Image (cartoon, rainbow, N blue to C red):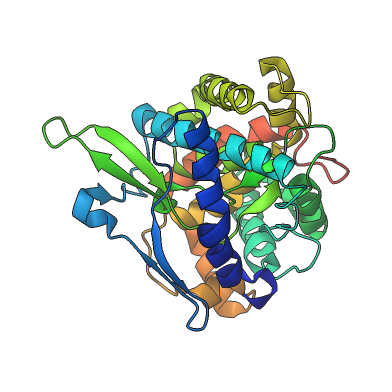
Amino acid sequence: MAPYDIYNREMTIYQEVLPKCRELLNEIGDTERIFPTAIYVDRERMAIIFEDLSVVGYVMADRVRRLNEEHTHLILRKLAKFHAATAVLNERQSGCLESYDRGFFNRYTNAYSGYFVGGLLAAARWMSKVPTLAHYGEKLFALAPHYMDIGRECFAPTPGQVNVLAHGDVWTNNVMFKYDPNTGRPVDVLLIDFQYSFWGSPCIDLHHLFNTSLKEPLRRDQQNGLFQFYHKIFTETLEKLNYRQNQIPSLHQFKLEVEQKRFFALHSTVVVQPVMISQDPTDACFNALMNDDERGIRFKNRLYNNPTVQQNLHSLVPFFDRKGLLEVNQTC
């Protein structure tokens, strides 16, 4: 993944950006941990040595079972504070984070098109065989040649809005939870893996988390409350840190931005989640995911044999269509 320069970028984030975010939050008396400590960054060997989170009780949740509201609230609280701190850091240090412009969709490369467009086409092939979804399948086939361009536009920072250093890949396997040993309930979470962080809308992270990692019906029916929960912490943290660069959004304004970036909810639902909750090991490897050769097509087609994926497409693709997200001429 050379075009993304993920290893150098992540090393810089752990070595330079995250410590500064921690310092900013400490200024307002917020000492809650958001991410693990990088003990040593070895650029010669392209390695980061982290503290062992398992020793202090952090584990990953089950990616197939997905997350309930308690888990999600913990993530949103940490994510909101991280986002706010990066907005302020960028303001105070003259746009220092705006060079992080290589998220999954970016203007430099289409390296992920085999995965993204290939997954979209696999979904379209499955839907075209289902009478109630065939119409949507045809729309996805028509959307495919424009898909990467729409994604790039969605990932572009929006002038006049509060942009942040988005994590870029927030889902179940990129966070670690600590659980109460007596109740089994989650009590803390840390964000990990900042390889695809980019400067843009905070809503990208939220759409990705909600549409890859939440249980149903939490994902289908309760997103409005989750956006509101995030917005409260995000805006309060911006205010405490005296952010001034752009207007801090009201809840209504934030919800408009949510809609503006909802293409990524479609993408996360139709293309990404089928990979993340797959339990079929046949042909499952990075090359099959990224390539559109015969093996890659077989692998992607099988993702849509998953009954959970099929149920999600039945319930959510019509919703995305009503939002105009299956149209070729959409703009983010």
| Residue 154 vs residue 133, the one in the foreground | 154
Instruction: Kindly identify the residue that appears in the image at 50 percent across and 51 percent down.
Output: 19
Instruction: Kindly identify the residue that appears in the image at 21 percent across and 48 percent down.
Output: 57
Farthest-out residue, right: 329
In the depicted structure, whether residue 9 falls above or below residue 276: below
Q: Is residue 61 left or right of residue 102?
A: left
Residue 291 in the image: state x and y as whole percent.
62, 75
Q: Is residue 216 left or right of residue 134?
A: left
Placement of the N terminus among the 4 image quadrants: bottom right
Q: Quadrant of residue 82?
A: top right
Residue 125 in the image: state x and y as whole percent.
64, 57
In the depicted structure, whether residue 239 falls above or below residue 31: above
Q: Does the rendering let one see residue 205?
A: yes
Residue 40 in the image: state x and y as whole percent.
41, 68
| Residue 331 vs residue 187, the one in the foreground | 187
Q: Does the rendering let one see residue 304?
A: no
In the depicted structure, whether residue 203 falls above or below residue 48: above
